[in-house]
Image (cartoon, grey):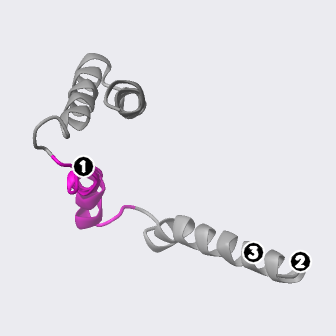
Amino acid sequence: MSTAERIITIAAVVLGTMVTRFAPFLIFRKEPPKFVSYLGTVLPYAVIGLLVVYCLKDAPFTAWHGLPEAIAIGAILLLHRWKHNTLLSIAGGTAVYMLLVQKVFL
């Protein structure tokens, strides 16, 4: 791939990202429709739920095999209940899971 092709690819990606970021502000100049506002409030929870289902769809919850996942989910729930911080909950749950699968459940 030549330098010109790389520059064109990067420019296309930047342009596509900028258009998708700025389009809602250009389309809805004043107030977005109520349906769009509703989607903005419910979609984050739906996406998180979908990610949880997707991540756990192949987890074997039989015998001891699903125990790291279950403990990590518990850690996420406890952290979020304690601090109400999504990023802390995700990072803490990931750290607990990685510690369990790399050091405890070999």
Magenta-tinted stretch = 31-60
Q: Which mark is residue 52?
A: 1
Q: Residue at x 37, y 61 (%)?
A: 31
- Which one is in front in this view, the residue at disc 1 or the one at disc 3? 1
Q: Is 82 located above or below residue 71 in the figure?
A: above
Q: Which residue is mark 2?
A: 3
As drawn, the residue found furthest toward the right would be 3
Q: Residues within 10 Å of mark 2 (few under 14, many from 20)?
A: few
Measured as percent of width and height from the top left, residue 19 is found at 58, 73
Q: Residues within 10 Å of mark 1 (few under 14, many from 20)?
A: few
Measured as percent of width and height from the top left, residue 40 is found at 30, 56
Which element is circle 1 on?
A: helix
Quadrant holding the C terminus: top left
- Which one is in front in this view, the residue at disc 3 or the one at disc 2? 2
Viewed as shown, does residue 104 lie left or right of 27? Answer: left
Taking the magenta stretch, the answer to whether it contains residue 41 is yes
- The amino acid on which the numbered mark 1 sits, given as a three-letter code, is Val
Quadrant of the rendered image containing residue 79: top left
Q: Which residue is mark 3?
A: 11
Q: Earlier in the sequence, mark 3 or mark 2?
A: 2
Q: Earlier in the sequence, mark 2 or mark 1?
A: 2
